[in-house]
Amino acid sequence: MSQPRYTLTAMALHWGQAILIVWLLWLGWTMTDLPKGAERSAAYGLHKSLGLLALLLVGLRLAWRARHPAPPAIGQGREAFLAKRVHGGLYVFLLLAPLAGYLASAFTPYAVKFFGIELPKLFPADESLNALFKQLHLIVVWGGAGLIALHLLGALKHVFLRDGTLRRMLPGRRDQ
Ligand code: HEM
């Protein structure tokens, strides 16, 4: 069945961000258990850099999306309504998770680095704000992981229904 598709730019942003987010969740989950030392510092540094890249990408994605609406949804009713809410929630997660992570790091005495480049220090060190944004980061991140699971379940259902929904987000011939 041929369906209206997402553009190649939308696909690249979607899959690029998907890989980045899975990497960040895994890094975040494992790095906090590492013993203090060089490996832990490197993992934290990489996590912060990739997280800032994710923030940059969601900005690009939202700006691009504002000018290029998604193709019309295939399903209708309750399911389409739920999918729309999950997509909205995912955008909130994509924006809030890195922002809260950045703010948690920005309220420590150390400068945040983006792949080795020191960012300007915008805030003075503040322990309680650091703890607040750390907590917010964890809540948003694990709430987002739940939304990702729902999103994957929805995609899986469409694969079983063979209604061409997943193909809309995959490159390939139009008439496949
Ligand atoms: C979409 C982007 C991001 C995702 C998905 C993400 C994910 C995670 C996860 C899963 C954890 C572990 C949570 C836990 O211990 O249960 C974590 C921790 C952390 N993240 Fe992120 N993160 C993102 C962006 C950022 C950014 C941009 C920064 C800073 C520039 C950052 C700084 C941190 C720090 C410092 C911790 C450790 C908190 C602690 O010590 O308890 N994260 N992140």
Image (cartoon, rainbow, N blue to C red):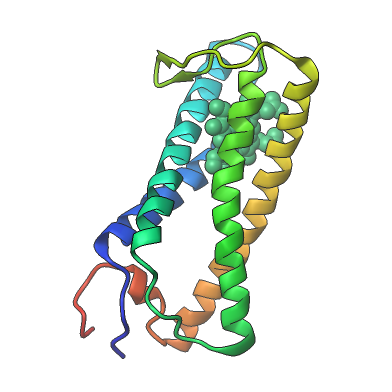
75 left or right, relative to 176? right
Q: Residue at x 28, y 57 (%)?
A: 9
Estimate the x, y position of residue 59 in percent, counting from the top left: 43, 45
Residue in view at x 40 percent, y 59 percent: 66
Q: Quadrant of ligand 1?
A: top right
Residue 170 as seen in the image, left or right of residue 43: left
Is residue 47 in sight in this rendering? yes
Instruction: Look at 53% across and 80% down and name the residue there.
Output: 157
Classify 116 as above or below 129: above
Q: Position of residue 111 (x, y in %)?
A: 54, 12
Instruction: Check the picture and name the quadrant holding the C terminus.
Output: bottom left
Q: Residue farthest to the front?
A: 67
Horizontal placement of 152 versus 56: left or right? Answer: right
Viewer-proximal residue among 164 and 35: 164
Indicate whether 36 appears above or below 46: above
Residue at the image point whose x is 33% and y is 61% from the top: 11
Which quadrant would the N terminus be assigned to in this image?
A: bottom left
Q: Nearer the viewer, residue 159 or 55?
A: 55
Residue 50 versus residue 94 in the image, above or below: above
In this view of the protein, which residue sits in the foreground, 15 or 161? 15
The relative height of residue 100 versus residue 149 in the rendered view (above or below) is: above
Residue 34 picture location, percent across and down = 64, 22
The number of numbered discs placed on residues in the rendered structure image is 0
Percent position of residue 116, x then y = 40, 15
